[in-house]
Image (cartoon, helix red, strand yellow):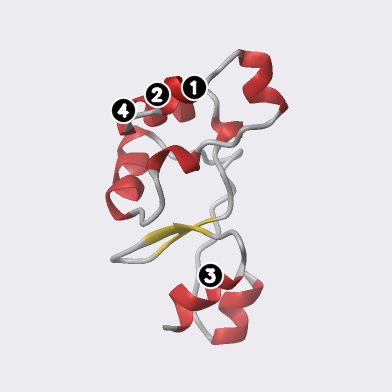
Amino acid sequence: MRIAEELGVQADVVLYLKTPPDAATLRDIIAKLEDPVTDLVRRDSLWAKLGLTDADVATADQVVEVLVRHKQLLQRPVVVTKKKAIIGRPKERVRELLGG
């Protein structure tokens, strides 16, 4: 959000735990995503606790299914414009997308 403000770009912040994206929204993001779709899923302690493997999120359909069931696994930040979507790590990528 700070980078958007610095660049004078209006941004809507979605608090993904309060308002998680539904399957249709995730599919819209994936359609614009420049990163591998599997990168949308965080590999953290919840991932390990659930016993998930890379094979469980190898396709767009699998990613959508996992993220709808376990919203906490959504990698963030995800920055979406009308034409593109990226995972905003490192944060310089956000600057490049919004400033370029």
The CA distance from mark 1 to mark 2 is 6 Å
Contact, mark 1 vs mark 3 (Cβ under 8 Å) = no
The type of residue carrying mark 3 is: Val
Give the percent coordinates (x, y) of residue 32: 30, 55
The type of residue carrying mark 4 is: Asp
The CA distance from mark 4 to mark 2 is 6 Å
Q: Is residue 71 above or below residue 33?
A: above
- Disc 1: CA contacts within 10 A as few (<14), some (14-19) or many (>=20): few
Front disc: 1 or 3 = 3
The CA distance from mark 2 to mark 3 is 26 Å
Quick one: label 4 or label 1, which is nearer the N terminus? 4
**Residue that label 3 marks:** 94
**Disc 2, SS:** helix
Contact, mark 4 vs mark 2 (Cβ under 8 Å) = yes
**Residue that label 4 marks:** 61
What residue is rendered at 38% in x and 30% in y? 64
| Quadrant housing the N terminus | bottom right
Front disc: 4 or 1 = 4
The CA distance from mark 1 to mark 3 is 27 Å
The CA distance from mark 4 to mark 1 is 12 Å
**Residue that label 1 marks:** 69
**Residue that label 2 marks:** 65
